Amino acid sequence: MQAFQQWLIQHGYSMKTVNDRVSVIKVYMSLANQAGITPDSEILKLQSVRGYTRKEAKDTDAKREAEGIATRMGAKKSTATIITDEQAKALCQARSDTPQARRDALPGLELSH
């Protein structure tokens, strides 16, 4: 399992994806154990494998960047884009002429009807 984690990291998968995949494998292995397909000894080994903490993930990403290894696949960003109140109001007002737009408006922002 740890070799799989390292393979994912070396191939540029995000740390969240690595943790998610490890979690899924653990669930399926547990189900296989309950069905009598996987022996208890394998489950005991699997329990020692854990995902990366937030700090470990940041440290691993910093190390990957230094080594020129991608830290995520695709164009999705790891952090949110913060917008100003004015930008939020402009976005809400761009569609404020429909009932759905008024329903979806951000709380606390006044929209003109």
Image (cartoon, rainbow, N blue to C red):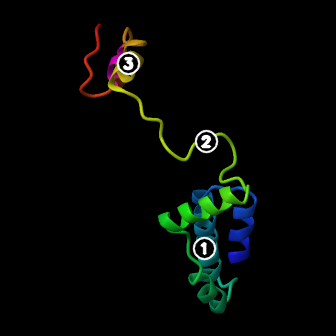
User: Is residue 48 shown to the viewer in this render?
Assistant: yes
In the figure, 90 relative to 54: above or below? above
Q: Could you say where residue 11 lies in the image, as x and y percent from the top left?
A: 75, 58
- Residue 76's label in the rendered image is 2
Q: Main secondary structure of the magenta part?
A: helix
Residue 46, quarter of picture: bottom right
Residue that label 3 marks = 92
Residue at 67% x, 58% y: name it: 66
Q: Outermost residue, front direction? A: 66
What amino acid type is highlighted by mark number 2?
Lys
Which is more N-terminal, label 1 or label 2?
1
In this rendered view, identify the residue nearer to me: 70 or 20.
Answer: 70
Magenta extent? 99-103
- Few, some or many residues within 10 Å of mark 3 (<14, 14–19, 20+): many
What amino acid type is highlighted by mark number 1?
Lys
Residue that label 1 marks = 26
